[in-house]
Amino acid sequence: MNHSKENKQEHQHMMHSEEVGQTSHHSHQQEHPHEEGVHANHHSDHHVHHDHHHVGGSDVSHHSHHTHDAHQHHQGHDHDMMEHGGHMMHMGDMNTKLKVAVAVMIPLLAISPIAGFTLLRFPGVELVQLILGSIIFFYSGTPFFNGARGELQAKKPAMMTLISMGIIVSYLYSVYATILALLGQESMNFWFELSTLIVIMLIGHIIEMKAVMGAGDALKDLATLIPKKAHLKDGTDVAVEDLQIGDFLLVKENEKIPADGKILSVAHIDESMITGESRAVKKEAGDRVFGGSLNQNTPFEMEVTSLGRDSFLAQVTEMVRQAQNQKSKLENMADRVASWLFYAALIVGILAFIYWTMTANLAFALMMAVSVFVIACPHALGLAIPLVVARLTTISSKNGLLVQNRTALEQVNQIRFALMDKTGTLTDGKFQVRHSQDLVQGADTLAKMAALEVLSTHPIALSIVEAAGPLFYQAERVENIPGSGIRGVLDGRIYEIMSYKGLQEIGLPVDQDVIAPYLDLGLTLSFLVADRVVLGFVALGDQIKEDAKDFVEGLKAQGISPVMLTGDNPATAQKVASQLGIEDYRAELKPEDKAKLVKDYQARGAVLFIGDGVNDSPALATADLGFAIGAGTSVAIHSADVVLVQSNPSAVLDMLSIAKTTIRKMKQNLWFGAGYNIIAIPLAAGILYPSMGIMVDPLLAAVLMSLSTVIVAINAMGLRYKGDRE
């Protein structure tokens, strides 16, 4: 098994057997060290046969085990805070510190020499500079000092340590220069540079915090979907948290549904904010409805069936939280590079200080060292991955693409084969009457077949009866004909229902031009016969999804070979495969065969498996990347890396596209966040100053460093849903 697969299995094991507390540098801090393990029961397909025709069906149910509380009362708090080096900073505190810093910087600007010019000079100005500089240093600089302390306690010095070194050196030297000035000696201080440095750094941090919050608002958005109050059937309003399972509620028109439950009438529900399905979904009595979805223009009553942590939204919220907390290989690389940058900046800064002390003077040497410390701050590097991750989890969860294992997504560019179930992925998974046709005028084929089949429990019989609707005929003396079909009497005339194979065996002719298109689709044909005349037929089967062919072509365009897996007989499988343009298919498979096939294909390249997540768990877990498609609201499919709520195959292409764009943007941000330092650090150290007079003072260093952060943030926010497919 390859290394990435081991990581994936380790992740899945962690979800089920451990309580883990993970923190993510520069991402939303989760304060509760518990991960939910979400489970599903898995049932094998049961296959039934009608004469020589194969019919596939499945009985699916998901049972979510109880999970830990989601601690929703902390969500808003988490979104207002950010962590650096283990120290939590509140957004409001940062804004206050910035306002104080700006208020102090303005008078410092007026009384400090800039380019040899001072706006205001008066006796004792040095003392005023010392007081104002100390205020900005000790009050507005505290976020950096606290962050540095956290980094050093964790033995991971990085950005906050570098910033703190820069402003501490600037402050101490400025105090020293002020004392010299008060003693009457000529000296240069860094008070203005110190104040502007802290202001720019605070602005950069606030932009960073807002960017992370804006990119990762998935949890906050999901929490706001549930209304605060619910209407009980008796007319009283209660808080949603006071609802009980079994309560009967009234949901008025254009109101959000307050809890998961069972609808007692007919209504149209907008589930777009939950599943990404753009069209309103028609719900009939007995159907499930989900908290957070929007009722349209028909009031209805419902019974509450699940609440809190067992609800659909709570499960999605937990999946998003887990995905945001995972550490991928690229993030670990970013952490390592940030650590290397710290030591590189420290060494270069000290060397620059020594060199310029020997060749120039102490003030110039200190300024160069501070510039190196500031410009090398891995601000952009710290944001490079978390911002993209936050953006990925937000846009994907809002569109019904639920990422459970981000590490597996990093392999998306290596995928060479896409193994997929025919039923549910390429077809709609419903064995139904797709077409009925009279071959003799007035035959009323469907209604008469329904009358003959009404007492049968065979899947084909059930499909015919359902399609026909109310019965218009009463059948008598109905009996099975072994190996052929069924016979009965309607209005004194004997009718038979026969398979295509049965017709051929007794030599009854049927117009091949009429039935050929349905045979080519791999549909099952049943014929109504009376007096050795074929009166009509019905075509039954699993219908190919509208966008299945485009999906297959989309996979091929990305260099991924589609492989169709089915329990059907080879003839039916070949027809469906050829219609979709799939050259490689495997027929007559049992569910347990799929995982073995995944391993066989893995010997030739990385494998994506797409299945329904019910009887495909071993294959989903074995594949390099596993997508559970058409999960609907049963999102507790722990063996899948990605759960696609919608059943249309194009969602797979959308997820592949988003994943590829995500990896590309992560790499771009890593290169920019780290790469610019290759030029910036030597430049700040003054390498071009002797020959070209080019130097970077601390103020410019802070601006350049903050600019790199903004560029990384803009690049991350460029991640969009349904971008160009590669």
Image (cartoon, rainbow, N blue to C red):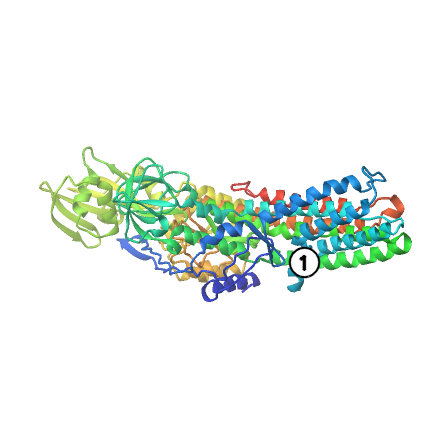
* x, y percent for residue 55: 31, 52
Circle 1 — which element?
helix
Q: Nearer the viewer, residue 228 or 637?
A: 228
* x, y percent for residue 370: 78, 52
Q: Residue furthest top?
A: 441
| Quadrant of the drawing holding the N terminus | bottom right
Q: Residue furthest left?
A: 492
Q: Amino acid at mark 1?
A: Ala
Q: Nearer the viewer, residue 20 or 598?
A: 20
Q: Is residue 499 left or right of residue 664?
A: left
The answer to whether any part of residue 378 appears in the image is no
Q: Residue at x 20, y 39 (%)?
A: 445
Image-quadrant location for residue 515? top left
Q: Which residue is mark 1?
A: 148
Q: Residue at x 58, y 45 (%)?
A: 210
Image-quadrant location for residue 301? top left
